[in-house]
Each structure stands twice: as C-alpha cells, then as structure tokens.
Amino acid sequence: MSSVKIDIGRKRKKRNKKLFKFTLITSIIAAAFLFVFFFFKTSEITYEGNNKSNEEELNEYIFDGRKPNTLIYSIFGNKKKEIPFISDYDVNIVWPNKIHVVVHEKELLASFYYAGVYEYIDETGNVVDSSCNLYDNAPLIEGISFDNLILGSRPHVSDEKAYDALVLYAHFARTYSLKFNKIIYKDGAIFYQINNAYINMGTTEHAEEKVFKLSKLYNKIEGLSGTLHLEDYDGGNKNIIFDKTVENSNGESSEESKSGTDENAQNAQQESENDQNAKNAQQESENDQNAESGEQNTASGEGESETVSQSEE
C-alpha cells in the first residue's frame, strides 16, 4: 500500500515538474514575442530618390500599406517586388524601429500614347513602363503609330526609321538638358515642340550639331510662337530662320517674310512676342558663329557671320 502511494507521489512530482517547465517556456516565449513586437515595431518609414511615386504609393507596393516589424521584415520580408517606374530599391533598417528606403527609378527617355495610357521608353527604345500620368521629363512622341507592345521590348511601329530618329533626338535632348513637350515626326522631318514654338530639326544628318546649336538658343525661343529652322544647319556659318506666328485684328494668322543677311535682322532671341525689332538671339548666334569662325581662321580673324532672320507668319 505504501509503495502505491510513493508511485503516485512521484508521478505527481513529475507532472508538476513538466507543467512548471511548460509554463516557464511558454512565459519566456510570450515575453520574447512581446519584446519583439513592441521593441521592433516600426515607428517611421522614410523614402529617398522617389520623384514619380509618392510615399503612400511606395508604402502600398513595398509594405502592403502597413508598417512592418523591423526584425521580422529583415528576416522574412520580400525586398524585390516589381514596382512601376522603379528599377530597384534598397530597404535599410535603422535599428531598432525605423526604415529608410532608397529608390532607384527607371530612366525614362520619352513617351507615347497608346490604348488609353502613356507608354514610356528608355535609351534603347524599349518600353519600360506605362501610366495614366504624363511626366514632364519624358517628351511625348507623335507622328507614327504603335502596336503589339511587350514590356521590356521594342514596340512595333509604323516606321522603323522614323522611330530611330525620334529616339536619337530624344537622346540628344537629354544629353544637352533640353526639355520639350513633344518630339514630332512629320513629312520626313523631326520637330521639337516647346509650348507654341517648334524647331524643325530635319533628318538625323548632323543631328548633334543641330541640337548643340539649339542649346545656345533654347532660352530665347521658349516663350515665342513660331518655327525655328535648323533642318539645314551643319555646324557651319549659315543663316538661321525663325518664322514667327502672328495674328491680325481678325485673329487670323498671316505671313510676312523677312529674310536676310543684315546683321541687324530680327531673330529668335527676342524677349517679347510683340517686339518686332528684338535682336538678342541674332547677336547670340552671331557671337557663337564668330567664335567658331575665329577658331577656324585665327590668322585673319575673318569669318562669315551667321544671322538669324525672322519671318512673321
């Protein structure tokens, strides 16, 4: 009888010991969980390098709209999600409870409108993303049609040669930090558009020389209305014509041609659209061409002066 009581007592002690161990382990796990939950609870998420996406959008893409636990995210979080206009991003944990995200956005060269959205291309002419929004650092391509778009690939276009020319002039515009609303293909020529001013760049022959010249005149024609003719420019000393658009009293456009080699010819550098005698752009062009001529003929210092002649449409 006594031996039976001893066995029961031993079993109770073992059971109590197991219960104690279980309770202790459970308490430790619970305490650890609470520590991790509260100590590593994210209090702030900051972003760097995001120009096209706001922080709310990025937070939705990267963290599903929540503030994750920093410790758990660092171990189990998906850090390589596909995000529109984002080529890559780095999530940096600022221990214990802050997150800093460095965003690397895709380089957008230009855009075109297709099937109700804006498609964006990179330097190679490949489609890299799409959006309902038009970003001002990616000029809109017009003049050719597009079809059969595949993300990451070159689009099918109605004119391959024209598309190559549009991409080339978009590239040079970026090279010289020139911003345009549109890049247009029309009648075999490429046109830049800045609000109401158009620049006829012609074909791809001497393309970089034309864009370099345009960079010298860009600030002077930005507020004008008309067409600057650079289609025949080859880097030499030539007249540059600006056809200014004017309206008569009836609101109709008219043309009155003024040509010339006169050094006081009106040109694209006029500060006001109503100023008929503005000369600044002509002087800028003349000085630039005289400098080029001086480099080519330093002995005599002689060179044919380039002028910008203005025609009023």
Image: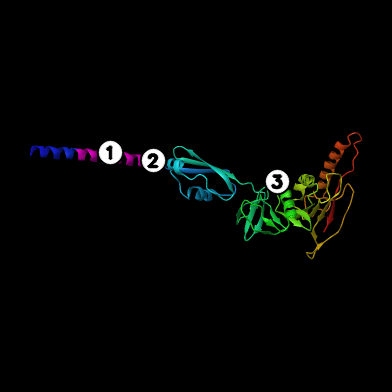
Visible in this render: residue 194?
no
Element assignment for label 1: helix
Measured Cα–Cα span from mark 3 to mark 1: 66 Å
Measured Cα–Cα span from mark 2 to mark 3: 49 Å
Taking the spot 14% from the left edge, 38% from the top edge, the residue there is 7
Element assignment for label 2: helix
Instruction: Check residue 42 in the rendering and tell me which mark sits there, or answer none.
Output: none
Q: Residue 204 placed where, x, y %?
A: 78, 50
Q: Residue 109 placed where, x, y %?
A: 67, 49
Residue for badge 1: 24
The label nearer to you, 3 versus 1, is 1
Measured Cα–Cα span from mark 1 to mark 2: 18 Å
First in residue order: circle 3 vs circle 1:
1
Identity of the amino acid at label 3? Arg
First in residue order: circle 2 vs circle 3:
2
Instruction: Check residue 36 in the rendering and tell me which mark sits there, or answer none.
Output: 2
Instruction: Check residue 174 in the rendering and tell me which mark sits there, or answer none.
Output: 3
Mark 2 burial class by Cα count in 10 Å: few <14, some 14-19, many 20+:
some
Mark 1 burial class by Cα count in 10 Å: few <14, some 14-19, many 20+:
few
Give the quadrant of residue 212. Answer: top right
**Mark count:** 3
Q: Are marks 3 and 1 in contact (CB under 8 Å)?
A: no
Taking the spot 76% from the left edge, 47% from the top edge, the residue there is 218
Identity of the amino acid at label 2? Val
Using the image as rendered, state which of residue 1 and residue 171 is in the foreground: 1
Q: Residue 138 placed where, x, y %?
A: 66, 51
Range of residues picked out in magenta: 14-37
Residue 28 magenta-drawn?
yes
Label the magenta part by its dominant secondary structure: helix
